[in-house]
Image (cartoon, grey):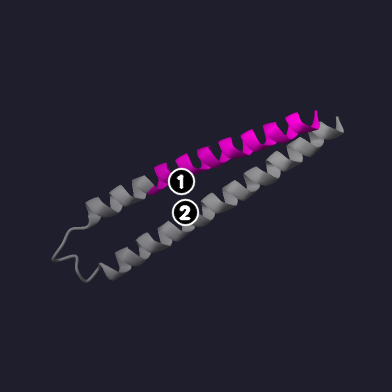
Amino acid sequence: MNLVNVVKRRVQSAMDSVRATALAFRLFFLGLIGLSLSTGANAAALIDTSAVVSAISEGVTIISAIGVAILSLVVVIKLFKWVQRVL
């Protein structure tokens, strides 16, 4: 039972790390989008950037979801190998 608790804590720690990293990337990209929107206000009369901004916003969510899924898979594989080695 102790081994199960150890594995649970390691998985939770890894998932917390992945969530924190994903949140940091999201905040970074949202900051970049906000910066681009605030600096693009003067150029709004010349170029319409709303389509590009919305495409980037949609892409950030998809890419971060894929990244979290891949990192989760790597963590699960590592934990499986670690538990297999212990047994």
Number of the front mark, 1 or 2? 1
Query: Residue drawn at (29%, 70%), measured in percent from left and top?
Result: 39
Q: Where residue 26 is drawn, which disc sits there?
A: 2
| Depth check, front residue: 27 or 2 | 2
Q: Is residue 44 left or right of residue 75?
A: left
Residue linked to disc 1:
64
Q: What is the x, y in percent for residue 77?
A: 62, 34
Residue 73 in the magenta stretch? The answer is yes
- The number of callouts visible is 2
Contact check, label 1 and label 2, Cβ < 8 Å:
yes
Give the magenta-colored segment's residue range. 60-87
Q: For residue 1, which quarter of the picture? A: top right
Label 2 crowd (10 A; few <14 / some 14-19 / many >=20): some
The kind of residue on which mark 1 rests is Ser
The kind of residue on which mark 2 rests is Arg
Which residue occupies the extreme front position in the image? 85
78 in relation to 56, above or below: above
| Depth check, front residue: 59 or 54 | 59
Q: What is the x, y in percent for residue 81?
A: 69, 33
* Magenta stretch: helix, strand or loop mostly: helix
Q: Secondary structure at mark 2?
A: helix
Q: Is residue 65 left or right of residue 1?
A: left
Q: What is the x, y in percent for residue 29?
A: 42, 57
Q: For residue 46, which quarter of the picture? A: bottom left
